[in-house]
Image (tube, rainbow, N blue to C red):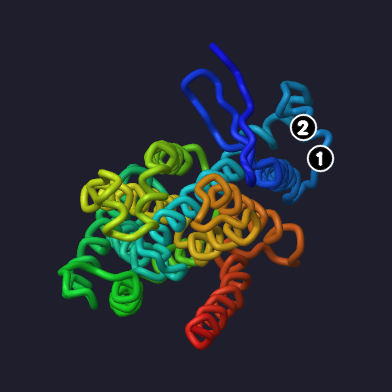
Amino acid sequence: MTISLETTSRRRALRVGPVSMVLRPAMTLIVVALAALALALFCLDIAVGESHLPLGRVLDVLTGGGTHSQRFIVLESRLPRALTALVVGVSLGLAGAITQSILHNPLAAPDILGITSGASLGAVAVLVGTGGAGTGLAATVGAPLAALMGGLLTAVAVYLLAWGRNPTGERGTTGLRLVLIGVGVNALLVSGVSWLLTRASSVDAQRAQLWLNGSLNTADRAHLAPAGVAATIVVLVALGSARTLAALRLGADTTRALGVRIQTQQAVLIGAAVVGASVATAAVGPVGFVALAGPQIARLLLRTPGEPLIGSALIGAILVVGADGASRALFPAELPVGVVTAAFGGPFLLYMLVRMNRKVTLS
């Protein structure tokens, strides 16, 4: 095996036997910094609560130390919640990066396209219909399954409604058309969720409404298991298709010339994004704007031509875990994590719209 460094006019390449990669020191440092920030927020999320623990004590417990009561608080009470926030953030960040990369539109996120609302409709139908939101077998198995089916059916409906003739004369879909159709479908699904709440009992409606705000209050190991499986699927599919995603950003003609089966690859990637967003929604409720903002923040920080996968996953984790910790540490009463992310995501969406409008005007 030979190891060599090859220097070009712009970048340095590392070659290890038959494998070669481009060295990007600045990007690597930013990714490492984002990972360190996500880890720090994860530990802080465990530290805050009704009884605050010093950060050093949390690290001691996580590495096998601490008293019996401290281990119970950290490992049994708070760790499942923090892990759920982490995997939900990773899933949403990757789901947003995949949809935005494929549709070539920074607004093409699962919550804008209606996928999150479809998942919410399916989960609320189970939670309200069983008369016990957040408890029992129907909540731990039925709700995630119903959310997944709701998200998948919504994605198929949006795709079919957006199918038509492109400006080039070919039949297919465009990113702008999908976003516009998704906004309309999203409004219909939100009204469906509201209708279900009016048909539910006051107790079930109150519990479902708390869930609809994106709450981690009931997060436990039962919620963590399906969210972790979904996050693993999205990570494996996304990283395994990183080169395909890069090719899909180059346009249909160039992508076909590179030997990529566009329709098949798009279906696999969109399916993975829907699975991640739907199961994440079933685990904690709809957490808005993370899938929208995460990839764009990562793209700005890393200065990449497309939405970076690892950076988007880390930013998604930072947003959800940070919002969960902030909701308990910075406010007199604990807020649902979805409320905190919406407070951040609303202004960010306006920023994105103004930025896109300026680009169109200048062009």
Residue at the image point whose x is 44% and y is 50% from the top:
283
Identify the residue position indicated by label 2 in the image. 59
Horizontal side of 74 relative to 341 (left or right) equals: right
Horizontal side of 261 relative to 38 (left or right) equals: left
Query: In the current view of this chain or complex, which residue is farthest to the front?
Result: 9
Q: Residues within 10 Å of mark 2 (few under 14, many from 20)?
A: some
Residue at the image point whose x is 34% and y is 47% from the top:
272
Query: In the current view of this chain or complex, which residue is farthest to the top?
Result: 1
Residue 55: give its label. 1
In x, y percent, where is residue 277? 40, 54
What secondary structure is found at the residue carrying circle 2? helix
Query: In the current view of this chain or complex, which residue is farthest to the bottom?
Result: 361
In x, y percent, where is residue 338? 55, 64
In x, y percent, where is residue 290? 53, 61
Quarter of the N terminus within the rendering:
top right
What secondary structure is found at the residue carrying circle 1? helix
Q: In front here: 184 or 179? A: 179
When asked about the image quadrant of residue 114, the answer is: bottom left
Is residue 217 visible from the viewing direction of this image? Answer: no
When asked about the image quadrant of residue 28, the answer is: top right
Residue 87 vertical placement versus 331 (above, below):
above
At label 1, the amino acid type is Leu
Residue 334 vertical placement versus 221 (above, below):
below
Q: Tell me if label 2 and label 1 are in contact, CB under 8 Å.
A: yes
Q: Residues within 10 Å of mark 1 (few under 14, many from 20)?
A: some
Horizontal side of 71 relative to 282 (left or right) equals: right
Residue 286 vertical placement versus 15 (above, below):
below
At label 2, the amino acid type is Leu
Measure the C-alpha gap from mark 2 to mark 1: 6 Å
Residue 352: give its label. none
Is residue 208 visible from the viewing direction of this image? Answer: yes
Residue at the image point whose x is 64% and y is 35% from the top:
7
